[in-house]
Image: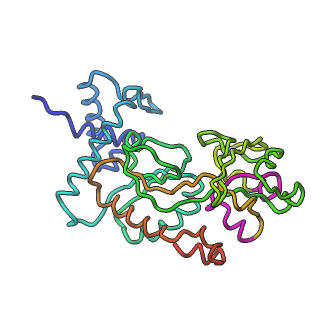
């Protein structure tokens, strides 16, 4: 029986991750010819090309994209097996690939990472900031931060905290159009619509303690797939919108923004750490997960409820 070429599969996964034979070779400390030969050997064994190549560019073929998830799983399982065999004998090292939402990642994840990097000098991080939901295994990510109501049972998820979605506007806008007493009054006004959700422009609101619900149909003045783009226009008094608390809490604290109908909130969502389903992880990934759980134990956007100034809240993590 002929065994699979495990080394070639692992090298293929690394070349796809870095998009370059040279960069992959540098990362895994092999020569570029060795890396190139391994991929060619795998292609020859499979009888099909995995990459489109020319003198300037390379990209995965359709078959390469389809097989990449299998390659990443093989690599992750092998690394996890080595971690389990070694126990904690070695200091965590290597690269961790992270997918994180754009605004949350830059505003709240990035500020807590310097202390992690100082604590673990042998761990390197690669972060892709995007609001798109990626396939962790197929894309080769070790961990993702997701803001959602998760339903994918093929992944392992650890909830960090709940996040509120709040209706907000600038006080000047509310002074001009009036302060509504029911969500239906907002349907007469244009708003900011986040387009990366499941039903853009349709917001299911619930009233505290009453069980009442109302589906708010928005008319868009401004649409975007990243809600941070709305903030200058929001604070300029050009409309209203539904925003996660972590994005608007400072504006609320400083009174540049005001909650609309504070007894009504959008769907409750949560912040999760999500990893592939393997029962074992490399120690570098476990180290990052444990660190992030501690870092977000006290979220800075909860500060207005405690009466803390923004600078005090930001230092809490």
Q: Quadrant of residue 32?
A: top left
x, y (%) of residue 233?
78, 53
Q: Nearer the viewer, residue 64 or 225?
A: 225
Q: Residue at x 43, y 65 (%)?
A: 293
- In screen coordinates, is 38 left or right of 15? left
x, y (%) of residue 22?
37, 43
Q: Which residues are magenta?
A: 232-254
Q: Residue furthest front?
A: 210
Q: Quadrant of residue 300?
A: bottom right
x, y (%) of residue 118?
41, 71
Does residue 1 belong to the magenta stretch?
A: no
- In screen coordinates, is 225 left or right of 79? right
Relative to 270, is 50 above or below?
A: above
x, y (%) of residue 62?
41, 26
Does residue 233 belong to the magenta stretch?
A: yes
Q: Residue at x 47, y 33 (%)?
A: 56
Q: Quadrant of residue 178?
A: bottom right
Relative to 123, is 151 above or below?
A: above
Q: Residue at x 67, y 53 (%)?
A: 228
Relative to 74, is 87 above or below?
A: below
Q: Residue at x 41, y 41 (%)?
A: 139
């Amino acid at each position: 029986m002929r065994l699979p070429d495990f080394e070639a599969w692992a090298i293929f996964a690394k070349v796809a991750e870095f998009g370059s034979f040279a960069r992959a070779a540098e990362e895994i400390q092999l020569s570029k010819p060795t890396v190139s030969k391994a991929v060619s050997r795998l292609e020859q064994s499979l009888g099909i090309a995995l990459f489109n190549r020319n003198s300037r560019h390379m990209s995965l073929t359709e078959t390469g994209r389809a097989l990449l998830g299998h390659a990443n799983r093989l690599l992750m399982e092998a690394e996890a097996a080595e971690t389990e065999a070694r126990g904690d004998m070695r200091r965590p090292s290597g690269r961790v690939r992270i997918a994180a939402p754009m605004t949350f990642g830059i505003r709240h994840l990035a500020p807590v990472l310097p202390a992690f990097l100082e604590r673990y000098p042998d761990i390197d991080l690669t972060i892709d900031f995007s609001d798109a939901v990626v396939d962790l295994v197929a894309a080769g990510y070790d961990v993702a931060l997701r803001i959602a109501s998760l339903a994918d049972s093929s992944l392992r998820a650890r909830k960090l905290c709940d996040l509120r979605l709040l209706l907000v506007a600038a006080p000047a806008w509310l002074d001009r159009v009036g302060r509504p007493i029911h969500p239906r009054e907002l349907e007469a006004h244009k708003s900011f619509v986040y387009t990366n959700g499941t039903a853009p422009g349709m917001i299911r609101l619930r009233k505290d303690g009453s069980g009442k619900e109302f589906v708010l149909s928005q008319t868009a003045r401004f649409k975007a797939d990243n809600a941070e783009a709305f903030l200058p226009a929001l604070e300029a008094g050009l409309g209203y919108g539904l925003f996660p608390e972590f994005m608007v809490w400072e504006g609320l604290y400083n009174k540049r923004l005001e909650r609309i109908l504070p007894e009504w909130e959008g769907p409750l969502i949560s912040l999760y750490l999500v990893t592939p389903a393997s029962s074992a992880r490399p120690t570098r990934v476990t180290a990052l997960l444990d660190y992030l759980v501690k870092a977000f134990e006290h979220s800075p956007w909860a500060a207005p409820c405690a009466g803390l100034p923004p600078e005090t809240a930001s230092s809490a993590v």
